[in-house]
Amino acid sequence: MNISDLRTLMDYNYWANARILNAAARLTLEQFNAAGNLSFGGVRGTLVHAFGAESAWRKRAQEGLSPSALSGDEYPDLGVLRAAWLVEEGKMRAWLAGLSDADLQRAFAYKNLKGQPMETILWQGLVHMINHGTQHRAEVAVLLTDFGQSPGDVDMIVYFREKDIQ
């Protein structure tokens, strides 16, 4: 893995997040907050979880922190969640801008959500974070479609074609 490829993956991640968040913006507050059968509930719970995971992985790798899981109560509506996610995206992009290929090979230590000590190679943790987001975007996309607000295709090849990346 090199830093250019990781930045491309991260760009895709934020492009796909934006598609999901834009579709979620068309929901009523009741739909956004509705319970669901997913691991983290409905749209809000799943999006909060995905946002929290992105934030946690950056904080672990960059700041050496071991943050706890976020509560959905902190994000009562999409506007609050989107604003926080944009701040986090800015922090991630700024951090990635200063990394080199060699940095991606270093290991970082942290504690997982159960308090167990862990160690992960940087590029593996960040690629995991992106893949984790893909899973939860897909889950939210189903809910959004059920509410009549499909986000459209969020496949990486669609991103590559839209951005003319070869």
Image (cartoon, rainbow, N blue to C red):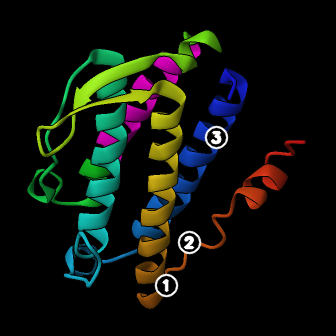
Foreground of the two, 152 or 56: 56
| Residue 41 percent coordinates (x, y) | 22, 75
Q: Is residue 158 above or below residue 119?
A: below
Marks 2 and 1 close (CB-CB < 8 Å): yes
- Specify the quadrant of the image occupied by residue 57: top left
Residue with the mark numbered 1: 145
Distance Cα–Cα, label 2 vs label 3: 19 Å
Q: Secondary structure at mark 3?
A: helix
- The secondary structure that dominates the magenta segment is helix
Q: Considering depth in this image, is 23 or 142 the residue closer to the camera?
A: 142
Residue shown at 24% from the left, 27% from the top:
110
- Quadrant location, the C terminus: top right
Looking at the rendering, the stretch of residues picked out in magenta corresponds to 82-97
Q: Are marks 1 and 3 in contact (CB under 8 Å)?
A: no
Q: Secondary structure at mark 2?
A: loop
- Residue at horizontal 76%, vertical 60%? 158
Q: Which residue is mark 2?
A: 151
Q: Is residue 26 left or right of residue 38?
A: right
User: Could you give the CA–CA distance between mark 2 and mark 1, rounded to whole angstroms?
Assistant: 7 Å
Q: What's the residue at 63%, 73% (across, down)?
A: 152
The amino acid pointed to by label 1 is: Thr
Q: Earlier in the sequence, mark 2 or mark 1?
A: 1
Residue assigned mark 3: 9
From what the image shows, is residue 20 above or below residue 144?
A: above
Label drawn at residue 70: none
Q: Earlier in the sequence, mark 1 or mark 3?
A: 3
- Please provide percent x and percent y for residue 30: 21, 80
Quadrant (top left, top right, bottom left, bottom right) of the N terminus? top right
Label 1, label 3: how far apart the Cα atoms are: 25 Å
